Image: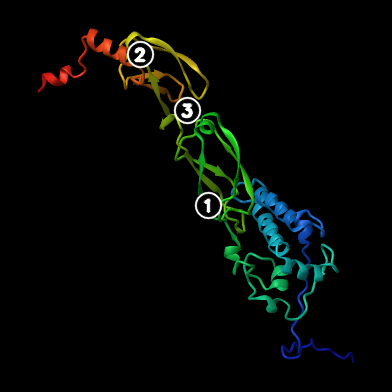
Amino acid sequence: MKKEHSAPTYDPNQFSQPLVTFMEYKDYYKILGISRETAQDDIKKAYRKLARKYHPDVSKEANAEEKFKEVGEAYEVLKDSEKRAQYDQFGSNYNQGQSFNPPPGWGQQRGAAGSGNFSNFFDSMFGGGGTGGGGDNFFAQGEDVNAKITVSLEDAFNGAKKSIRRPSGANQGGTINVKIPAGIVSGKKIRLTGQGKAGMGGSAGDLYLEISIANHSYYRLEDKNIYLDLPIAPWEAALGAKVTVPTLAGKINLTIPADAKSGQKMRLKGRGLPGKEAGDQFVVLQINTPPADSDLAKKIYQQMAEELSFNPREKLEQTL
C-alpha cells in the first residue's frame, strides 16, 4: 500500500534570522549620465540639466515624474561626499540589473526608513529621509530669491549685459550674467529661472532682480520720460537761437523760439526710454544771467538799465 505524505506545516518561529530581501541595484552614475570619476561640480551640472528636462511642471515626457524622482535620488547620494563614498564602497561590486543585498542593520544605522519618495534601494543603504529630513521636503521646489540691482540710465536706455555677484541665498556663489533689456524702468523685475535657492532634490527657485536706475548728473527720469535742464543766455531767450542739445541717443539741434521763458518745456518726441510706447525727452529752458565781473560787463548792464524799459515785477506791483 502506497504511503501518503502530508503537506509540510509552516512554523513562523522556526527561523531565527529574518528573511533577506534582495532588490535591484541602482546605478546612480548611469542615471545622471556620468562616470564614477566625475567631479562634484560636474555632478551638479548633470543633475540640473536632467531636473529641468524631467520636471513635472514643464516636461512632456510620459514618465517625467518617475524620472524626476530617480534623478533627484541619484543626486541626493552623489552630491554628498560621505554618501557617495558609502555608495561606492558597495556599488563597485554590482552592475545595473543585479540584486543588491545590504548588510544587516545597514539602513537602520543611517536614520529612519520609509521616506515615501525614495526607492527601497536608497532606504536600504541610507535609511531614507535624505538630508532634508523627510521625503516630502526632499522633492520640494526651491525658494525664490528677491534682490535689487542698480543700473545707469544709459544702460536702461540702451540695454546692457552685466556680470554681478550672486545675491545671498541664491543658488551657488560667484557671479551671474544678467541681460538688462532696453527701456526697463525702476521697479521692474528681471526673472532668472532656476537661479534662486536650491530645492531639496527638486528644481531651484527663481531669482528676481528689481531694477533701480541710478541718478544722473544731467538727466532726470520720470517713468519713461527724460528731463534735461538746458541753460541758455538772455539774448538766446530774447532773440531765439539754434543750440545743440544732448540726448541719450546722440546730439540734436534744437531751435529756441524768440521770447522764451525760463522753465519753458520743449518736447522731443520719442527721445525718452524706448519701448512699445517710447517716452519723450523734455528740455526745460533755464535762462542764465552772465556775471557782472568786468568793467565791460558792468557798462553793458548799466546801458540796458538806462535804455530798456523793462520791469520784471510790473504785474506783481499792480496787485499791491
Image x and y of residue 312, in percent: 21, 17
Q: Nearer the viewer, mark 1 or mark 2?
A: 2
Q: Give the mark nearest the N terminus, 1 or 2.
A: 1
Q: Residue furthest front?
A: 295
Q: Which residue is mark 2?
A: 296
Name the element at disc 2.
helix
Residue at 42% x, 27% y: name it.
226
Three-letter residue code for mark 2 = Leu
Q: Residue furthest left?
A: 320
Please give left or right for residue 79 compared with residue 148 in the image: right
Given residues 224 and 219, the one toward you in this image is: 219
Please give left or right for residue 306 compared with residue 106 in the image: left
Given residues 261 and 117, the one toward you in this image is: 261
Name the element at disc 1.
strand
On screen, 319 above or below 143? above
CA separation in Å, label 2 and label 3: 45 Å
Image x and y of residue 229, in percent: 39, 25
Image x and y of residue 76, in percent: 68, 63
Residue 297 picture quarter: top left
Three-letter residue code for mark 3 = Leu
Residue 287 visible, this orientation: no
Q: What is the crowding at mark 2: few (fewer than 14 residues within 10 Å), some, or many (at least 20)?
A: few
Q: Which residue is mark 1?
A: 145
Q: Which residue is mark 3?
A: 273
Three-letter residue code for mark 1 = Val
CA separation in Å, label 3 and label 1: 28 Å
Q: Marks 2 and 1: in contact by CB < 8 Å?
A: no
CA separation in Å, label 1 and label 2: 65 Å
Q: What is the crowding at mark 3: few (fewer than 14 residues within 10 Å), some, or many (at least 20)?
A: many
For the N terminus, the image quarter is bottom right
